[in-house]
Image (cartoon, grey):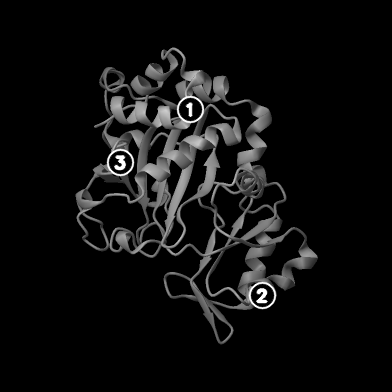
Amino acid sequence: MWFAKPEKLHAKGIMGMNHRNISYIGRYNPRTLFPLVDDKLKTKQLALNAKVTTPELIGVISHQYEVKGVVDIVKDSPGFCIKPAKGSGGKGILVILRHQDGFYYKPNGQGETPEDLERHVSNILAGLFSLGGKPDVAVIEALINFDDVFEGYSYEGVPDTRVIVFKGFPVMAMMRLSTAASDGKANLHQGAVGVGIDIATGHALRAVQYDTPLTTHPDTNKPLDSLKIPHWETLLHLSASCYEMSGLGYLGTDMVLDQKKGPMLLELNARPGLAIQIANGRGLLPRLRQIEGLRGHEQMGIEERILYVKKHFRS
């Protein structure tokens, strides 16, 4: 195993976990606001009130006696996703692409029975996937029709874009591409590919899997340096607006690109991970400190903030 020297990480402006927790999450994120983003159902309601586009909500199951009704809830939806409202790290997310003759097919082709769906929902309610193992509710959303422009960049899953937003400024971005190793999920610790994105243009900068650089997708061999995210301006605008929407000073916004509806907010994270620095090959600290030292930033609107980061954080 390879370790970098602390002085080398410091020179690159890499932020560690303790620094993030104390100087940014603890300082800029009021704990009273955490429930708004730790609960995906509350986040969705927040987004709907702010007229921010999110995946369609098909249904919610809150009690064990409602579990038998899951098949009826999804009967008119060709594809859907069942997720725990208080889950983290992609745990407990069940994606169904289609259903036919009483079977519900996952992205890997495996067929689930109605009893499998009921068991999964029951496990969610029992808190198997929730933070702290607390009782939870199951959220059922329509499947996202991901844009064809990402064909070959992701394997058996929807790619998403993580943008770190500090005081309303989108400061760093990466795209997360699912792989066979990640089982169609976009979580880096499960084997997804992280692609650093130029905040000014939406172009790929570099890519990593398991913290190791790579040039092509491990399952499709698609060259990753050709990746460019469409509707980048809209996606930046959407990310920046989550500052006003949530009240959180330091947050991660996860976006997806729907073929018909364009950029959509998937979820917010009050404790975004630090792997985005590895994907981008640079640290967050210089950009965060620049925003902290910027006079009059409180009066800047979304457009001004985006123009600022495109000018100063271009790679």
Q: Which residue is mark 2?
A: 71
Query: Foreground: 245 or 248?
Result: 245
Query: Image point 62% across, 41% down: which residue?
Result: 38
Q: Callout 2 environment at 10 Å: few (<14), some (14 to 19), or many (20+)?
A: some
Q: Is residue 198 left or right of residue 67?
A: left
Q: Position of residue 254 (x, y in %)?
A: 47, 45
Marked residue nearer the N-terminal end (2 or 3):
2
The vertical placement of 46 against 71, above or below, is: above
Query: Image point 46% across, 31% down: which residue?
Result: 302
Helix or strand or loop: what does disc 1 sit on? loop
Q: Which residue is mark 1?
A: 301
Between tags 1 and 2, which lies in front? Answer: 1
Which mark is drawn over residue 197? 3
Q: Is residue 170 at all visible to an observer of this figure?
A: no
Q: Is residue 144 left or right of residue 117?
A: left
The vertical placement of 264 against 164, above or below, is: below
Query: Which residue is at the far bottom?
Result: 101
- Identified by mark 3, the residue type is Ile
If the image is split into quadrants, where does the N terminus sit?
top left
Q: CA distance from mark 2 to mark 3?
A: 40 Å
Marked residue nearer the N-terminal end (1 or 3):
3
Determine contact: label 1, label 2, CB under 8 Å: no
